[in-house]
Amino acid sequence: MDRDTRRAAVAAAWFLIIFGVLAYYLPSIMLAVGNVSTIAAGGVAVLFVIAFFGVFWLRGRSQRTKNGH
């Protein structure tokens, strides 16, 4: 495993750990926020999904500019 592959694997592991923990606690977070506002609780879920796919989008843009496309 070369240096770039190792760095990508470590980054992917951190990504899975962080989003896995957030996904595990998301229902509790939504219930707590839902006590204040149900719309805000829905917003928390939407932000989670946007952040999840936003990371992939940013990674794709970074790889495209890195490869010169």
Image: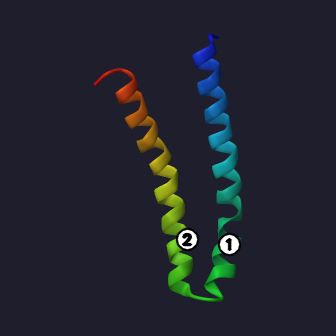
| SS category of the residue bearing label 1 | helix
Determine whether label 1 and label 2 are within 8 Å by CB.
yes
Q: Residues within 10 Å of mark 1 (few under 14, many from 20)?
A: some
Of callouts 1 and 2, the N-terminal one: 1
Q: Nearer the viewer, residue 69 or 15?
A: 69
Q: Residue furthest left?
A: 69
Residue highlighted by disc 2? 44
Which residue is at 55% across, 71% downward?
44
Which residue is at 46% across, 37% downward?
59
The quarter of the rendered structure image containing the C terminus is: top left
**What separation in Å lies between label 1 and label 2 (alpha carbons)?**
8 Å
Q: Residues within 10 Å of mark 2 (few under 14, many from 20)?
A: some
Numbered-mark total: 2
The quarter of the rendered structure image containing the N terminus is: top right
State the image coordinates of residue 57 (x, y, percent, origin top left): 41, 43
- Above or below 35: residue 69: above
State the image coordinates of residue 18 (x, y, percent, origin top left): 68, 49
Which residue is at 71% across, 64% downward?
25
Which residue is at 48% across, 67% downward?
46
Instruction: Give amino acid for label 2.
Output: Val
Please tell me the numbered disc located at residue 6: none
- Above or below 55: residue 36: below
Instruction: Give amino acid for label 1.
Output: Ile
State the image coordinates of residue 3 (x, y, percent, origin top left): 63, 14
Q: Residue furthest bottom?
A: 36
Question: Does 4 sit left or right of 10 as displayed?
Answer: left
- Above or below 21: residue 11: above
Q: Nearer the viewer, residue 12 or 61?
A: 61
Q: How is the image coloured?
A: rainbow
State the image coordinates of residue 30 (x, y, percent, origin top left): 63, 75
Residue highlighted by disc 1? 29
